[in-house]
Amino acid sequence: MSGGPGAPPLLVAQFSDLHLRAPGLTANRIVETNMLAARAFAAFAALAPAPDALAITGDLADRGEAEAYRLLAGLIERHVRVPVILIPGNHDDRAAMRAILGDRLAADDEAGINRPAEHLPVRLLPLDSTIGGESHGRLGDGQLRFLRDRLAADPRPAAILLHHPPIATGIAHMDAIGLENAAALEAAIAPHAARVAGLWCGHVHRMIHGRLAGAPVVIAPSVAHQVQFDLKPDGPSALVLEPPAFVMHRWDGASFTSQMVFVDSYPGPFPFLS
């Protein structure tokens, strides 16, 4: 992992929006999310070079079922040998997450349910943007204070993880349930923008790039199903069975490049011919 020029790059894989169900159940009555998650974790385990960490940016479960979190715990145990950063999404249940995955979550009140990974060359600072019973997101005073304090205390670069994107995407029905106090997040990071290497989000089920306070924002696709690409102001809320994918973030000692990686295998590779 890269701590500076000449060192190996730091690789962080980002999964999002698994929407796991209790065994035998599907999401939205049609999506075999448990099977798709198993494929994603198998693909993660086969990556070479291996990532240095795995971040999962919310909606781990579709209905907050304890059985879904047990399934996730088993997938992590079988396939992952590096630090895992978990954050909740609006479909998650914090109490069930803590009951099943508590050994991977923070224990102190200030950090909430999220455990930072601060031993890497780029610190990974997770935030909980969920509001119980609501689809939209908001960062509470404690989360914003936690972020300001962590950014001020350490000059090393940091990536900020949260479920709800702080930018508009143009997909109207998703923007309506985005992060409602994005301006507060922008104000929190602005004094430290030079050390914010990225903001990594989920929720929208599409690969989308933007900026906040000069920092790059990456919204990850889902390792299950995607949201319909539709930029009409009255576009309906709908999913599509486009290929499952995740993001690989590569830190070269100065900045991240972020690439979408499809979970499934496709024909090839074939050599380019002159």
Image (cartoon, rainbow, N blue to C red):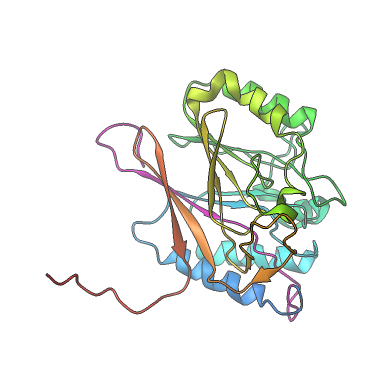
Task: Please tell me in which quadrant of the rendered image residue 10 appears.
Answer: top left
**Residue at the outermost left position:** 274
Queried whether the magenta region covers residue 109, the answer comes back as no
The residue lying toward the viewer, choosing from 206 and 188, is 206
Magenta residues (range): 1-27
Would residue 116 be found to the left or right of residue 94 on screen? left
Q: Nearer the viewer, residue 136 or 22?
A: 136
**Image quadrant occupied by the N terminus:** top left
Q: Is residue 80 visible?
A: no
Q: Is residue 270 left or right of residue 172?
A: left
Q: Judge whether residue 168 can be spotted in this image.
A: yes
Task: Kindly indicate the quadrant of the structure image that contains residue 206.
Answer: bottom right
Q: Quadrant of the C terminus?
A: bottom left
Q: Measuring from the top left, give residue 123's x and y in whole percent.
A: 51, 34
Say above or below: 186 vs 177. Answer: above
Location of residue 200 in the rendering, given as x and y in whole percent from the top left corner: 57, 44
Give x and y (percent) for residue 222.
59, 62
Q: Is residue 63 above or below residue 198?
A: below
> Compared with residue 32, is residue 148 higher up or lower down, i.e. above or below?
above
Horizontal side of residue 9 vs 249, given as left or right: left
Residue in view at x 52 percent, y 21 percent:
154
Residue under the point 71% across and 68% down:
238
Q: Nearer the viewer, residue 65 or 182?
A: 182
Judge left or right: residue 114 versus residue 38.
right
